[in-house]
């Protein structure tokens, strides 16, 4: 009887052990799954939008303090929008900051021009937009646009005196000078021993078209850098002539005898140079039409010191496109639409 019992016991024992082992394995598997990386204690990390890689110490770019409502006072700059475009400010602070000064004035295509420009700037890391209206006050159209642009931006305004609003006279002089004054004011408030950060100033008119490569080129400016401009001066392009890495002349269709025969979109200046020359501004008195660029650059550099960019000035990365004058011949004299739409 005992022999029969033991024989059956040893036959069943292996199967019992197998069942116990399987139950233990299932219990361990369930326990580990409850602590998986997808649990609330270890949230899934999404990569940053637009593929921007962040270096050490990277943070969301904070615009410099204050936007002047008159070119002298200050008010809070427009906040970054909630769109993914704000991620362009997430870069290492060792990258020089580009300050783009854009004069603008009221006209039917103004919002369209600014929209195109903002779409470009949103793709440029470490850029602060200084938008200056030719107006006695900040207009509602531009104020709303800036608030929704999703860019670090300072919104200024200063009117052009009526006596200078004549054909043949330089335009946007007061607006560019207001941008320069605001920029210098930001760094006058810094402690003296602290040097200014690396930065580059660029005059970005709102009727031009810019390649993203241009901003990569200008960011390494040591003093004053130059490059070609397309569709300007009655030619397909104008450019500095370069020999052995130095500017020796100008390929231009108008007044090649100018000291700096270059378009406003054809140069950038380092922030250190702007701050070291506080009296360098665009002149009204004594400045001839078409000479604003030369009159300004003469105050801060020489032709021999210019830094050729864009493959020794052989590539066009900015175009003076200018939006075609719109045809509003059929626009009613009196507003007849029941809905008021901003264009």
Image (spheres, rainbow, N blue to C red):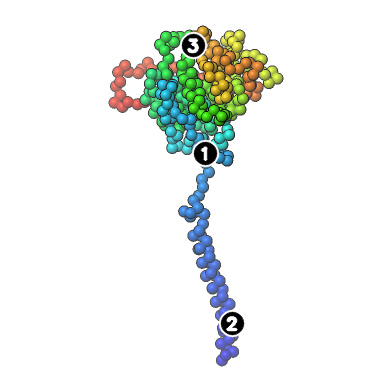
Q: CA distance from mark 1 to mark 2?
A: 69 Å
Residue 49 visible? The answer is: yes
Q: Residue at x 47, y 53 (%)?
A: 40
User: Dot 1 lies on which element?
Assistant: loop
Mark 3–mark 1 Cα distance, whole angstroms, equals 41 Å
Residue density around tag 3, few if under 14, some if 14–19, many if 20 or more, within 10 Å: some
Give the x, y percent position of residue 283.
50, 12
Residue wearing tag 1: 59
* Nearest to viewer (mark 1 / mark 2): 1
Residue that carries the numbered disc 2 in the rendered image: 10
**Which quarter of the figure is the N terminus placed in?**
bottom right
Q: Residue 286: x percent and y percent?
A: 51, 8
Q: Quadrant of residue 294?
A: top right
Tag nearer the camera, 3 or 2: 3
Lower sequence index among marks 3 and 2: 2
Discs 3, 1 touching: Cβ within 8 Å:
no
Q: Residues within 10 Å of mark 1 (few under 14, many from 20)?
A: some
Residue 59 image position (x, y, % from top left): 52, 39
What separation in Å lies between label 3 and label 2 (alpha carbons)? 109 Å
Q: Are marks 3 and 2 in contact (CB under 8 Å)?
A: no
In the image, 274 versus 162, the foreground residue is: 274
Q: Position of residue 122 (x, y in %)?
A: 50, 31
Q: Residue 107 lies in what quarter of the image? A: top left
What residue is pinned by disc 3? 284
Name the residue: 70% across, 20% down: 244
Q: Earlier in the sequence, mark 1 or mark 2?
A: 2
Along the polypeptide, which appears first: circle 3 or circle 1?
A: 1
Residue 283, placed above or below residue 188: above
Q: Is residue 51 visible?
A: no
The secondary element bearing badge 2 is classed as: helix
Q: Give the vertical position of 33 relative to 124 (above or below).
A: below
Q: Are marks 1 and 2 in contact (CB under 8 Å)?
A: no
């Amino acid at each position: 009887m005992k022999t029969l019992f033991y024989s059956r016991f040893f036959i069943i024992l292996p199967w019992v052990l197998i069942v116990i082992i399987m139950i233990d394995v299932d219990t361990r598997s369930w326990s580990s799954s409850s602590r998986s990386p997808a649990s609330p204690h270890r949230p899934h990390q999404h990569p940053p939008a637009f593929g921007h890689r962040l270096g050490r110490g990277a943070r969301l770019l904070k615009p410099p303090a204050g936007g002047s409502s008159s070119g002298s006072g200050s008010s809070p700059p427009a906040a970054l929008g909630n769109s993914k475009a704000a991620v362009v400010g997430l870069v290492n602070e060792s990258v020089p900051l580009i300050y783009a000064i854009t004069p603008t004035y009221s006209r039917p295509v103004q919002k369209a021009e600014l929209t195109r420009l903002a779409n470009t700037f949103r793709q440029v890391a470490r850029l602060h937009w200084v938008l200056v209206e030719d107006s006695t006050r900040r207009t509602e159209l531009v104020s709303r646009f800036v608030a929704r642009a999703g860019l670090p931006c300072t919104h200024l305004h200063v009117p052009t005196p009526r006596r200078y609003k004549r054909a043949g006279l330089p335009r946007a002089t007061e607006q560019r000078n207001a941008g320069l004054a605001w920029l210098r004011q930001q760094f006058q408030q810094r402690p003296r021993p602290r040097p200014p950060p690396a930065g580059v100033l660029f005059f970005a008119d709102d009727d031009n078209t810019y390649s993203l490569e241009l901003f990569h080129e200008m960011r390494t400016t040591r003093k004053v850098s130059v490059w070609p401009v397309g569709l300007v001066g009655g030619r397909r392009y104008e450019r500095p002539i370069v020999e052995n890495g130095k500017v020796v002349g100008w390929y231009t269709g108008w007044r090649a005898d100018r000291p700096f025969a270059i378009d406003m979109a054809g140069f950038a200046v380092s922030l250190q140079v702007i701050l070291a020359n506080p009296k360098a501004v665009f002149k009204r008195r004594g400045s001839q039409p078409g000479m604003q660029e030369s009159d300004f650059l003469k105050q801060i550099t020489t032709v021999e010191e210019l830094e050729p960019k864009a493959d020794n000035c052989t590539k066009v990365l900015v175009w003076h496109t200018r939006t075609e004058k719109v045809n509003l011949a059929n626009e009613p004299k009196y507003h007849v639409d029941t809905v008021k739409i901003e264009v």
